Image (cartoon, grey):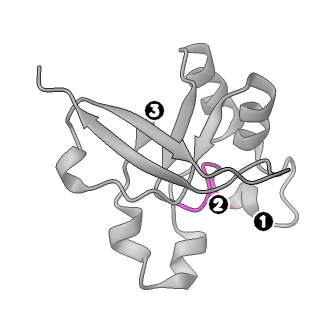
Amino acid sequence: FLYHTNHYERYFKDRTKWWTEFAGLDGEAMNFLADAGVVNVGTEAFSIDNPAATLPDADPPYPAHQVCRDRKVLNTENLIIPQELVGRRFTYIGFPIKIVGGTGGWIRAVAVLDER
């Protein structure tokens, strides 16, 4: 499940807003997606969580990340989702870079268009 918000286009050049102005999920929304069978959630923003949940005093901190951890759902952040893909059906594949001992890392994101 990828959600497109134009975050990259709007805020890439404004690093202050990049970190504070984005649409994110809360734990309830992430549980809804996991219940629906979603195995990976991706966004253009630096976090799948809503901005308030990423602050040092957030309680709980990063609830969408916690649901992903508990429900074994992958999350992919800082994607560039081209406008040409919006509204189209495609298969999303993230080819990971192996990092020894890591719990996350970079991917090469690929969209395989569905021509149906």
Give the CA distance from mark 2 to mark 1. Answer: 7 Å
Label placed on residue 51: 2
Q: Quadrant of residue 112?
A: top left
Q: Between label 3 and label 1, give the one nearer the viewer.
A: 3
Q: Nearer the viewer, residue 64 or 103?
A: 103
Amino acid at dot 3: Phe
Give the CA distance from mark 3 to mark 1. Answer: 25 Å
Bounds of the magenta segment:
45-51
Q: Between label 2 and label 3, give the one nearer the viewer.
A: 3
Label placed on residue 55: 1
The secondary element bearing badge 1 is classed as loop
Please name the residue shown 57% across and 83% down the image. Answer: 16
Q: Quadrant of residue 46?
A: bottom right
Q: Is residue 4 left or right of residue 104?
A: left
Residue bearing mark 3: 1
Q: Are marks 2 and 1 in contact (CB under 8 Å)?
A: yes
Q: Nearer the viewer, residue 108 or 36?
A: 108
Q: Is residue 108 left or right of residue 112?
A: right
Please name the residue shown 55% across and 15% down the image. Answer: 37
